[in-house]
Image: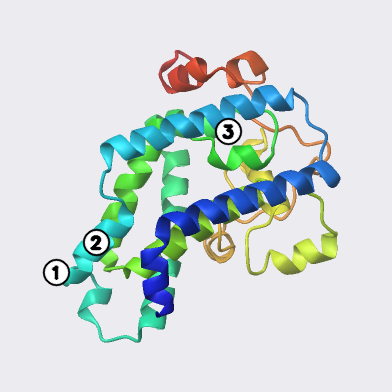
Amino acid sequence: MTFESFLLNHEATLRLSVFVGIFALIALWELLSPRRSLHYSKPRRWFANVSLVVVNTLVVRLLFPVAAMGIAVTAANNHWGILNQTALPTWLAILLAIVAMDLIIYGQHRLFHKVPWLWRVHRVHHADVDYDVTLGSRFHPVEIILSMLIKLAAVVLLGAPPAAVVLFEVLLNGLAMFNHGNISMPLGIDRALRLFVVTPDMHRVHHSVEVDELNSNFGFQIPLWDRLFGTYKAQAKAGHLDMVIGLPNQQHPKESYSLAKMLWFPFKRD
C-alpha cells in the first residue's frame, strides 16, 4: 500500500486521531507550562467553545455530504484543475497543492478582516477574551460554511490531489490547535521555529485588541505569507503577558461564552 492510498483509505481515522492526539498534548502542555494566566473560567470557556465545534460539525455534515476529499477525487477523475493538466511527480503535486491552499487560506483570512460583513462573522473567533487550544476551533457556522465553499472551489481550481487535501486538512487543524495554545517555550526556540511554522507567540499578536496587531500575522501554517505581503509583526507592544486579548468593545465574558449569543453575535446591533 502506497502512502497516498493509506491516506485515502484511512482519512477519517487519521484526522480524528491527529485531532484528539494534538488536542490532548497541547491541553497537557497548557496545564504544565502556561504562557499566560487565564482571565475566565476554563470549564465555562471550554464548554462554550466545544459546543460551537459540535454545532459546526453537524452543519458541515448536513450541508456538505461530499467533503473536500470527495471533490478532489471527482476533479482527478475528470481532469479538472491546473495540477490535473500536468505530468508532475505525485509528491511535487501534493506539495504544490498544500502550499497553494495555504496561500488561499491566508488570503481568505485577510478578506474576512477587510470586508465589513465578513468581519462581523469572523469576529466571533476574536471575541474570546482568553487564548488557549479551544480557540483554534471557535468559528461561527456561517464562517465555516463560507470557508468550506472557498476550499472546495480551490480544490477544483488547483486540481489538488486527494492525498494533498487530506494532508492539508490534518496539518491545518493540528497547527491551528498548536498556534492557539497557551503554551510556553524558550524564546530562542520560538524565533527559530517561526521561520518555518506559525508559533503561538506569533499568532497571539493577531488576537490583540490593538488594531494594528489585530490586522497582522494572518497565517495559520506557513509564516512566509505574512513576511512576503507585509503583514508580519514580531511581538505585541504590551508584551505577551500584559497584552489584552479579544475585541476592544467586547470584553464581557457573559457575551463571549454563551452559545446562543455567539451564534447571534454577527447579527447584533453594535
Q: Which residue is label 3 attached to?
A: 126
Quarter of the figure with residue 138: top right
Give the numbered dot on residue 39. Answer: none
- Mark nearest the camera among 1 and 3 is 1
Q: Estimate the spatial distance between the alpha carbons at disc 2 and disc 1, rounded to whole Å.
A: 10 Å
The residue nearer to you, when weighing 199 against 71, is: 71
Left/right of residue 170 with respect to residue 207 in the rendered view: left
Q: Is residue 173 left or right of residue 158?
A: right
Q: Mark 3: few, some, or many residues within 10 Å (few <14, many ≥20)?
A: many
Of marks 1 and 3, which one's residue comes earlier in the chain? 1
Q: Would residue 79 be found to the left or right of residue 243 on screen?
A: left
Which residue position holds label 1?
78
Q: Residues within 10 Å of mark 2 (few under 14, many from 20)?
A: many
Residue ID for mark 2: 156
Q: x, y (%) of residue 228?
A: 54, 65
Measured in 3D between alpha carbons, the distance from the residue under mark 1 to the one under mark 3, in whole angstroms, is 40 Å
User: x, y (%) of residue 163?
Assistant: 38, 69
Name the residue furthest left. 78
Please report contact status of discs 3 and 2: CB closer than 8 Å, yes or no: no
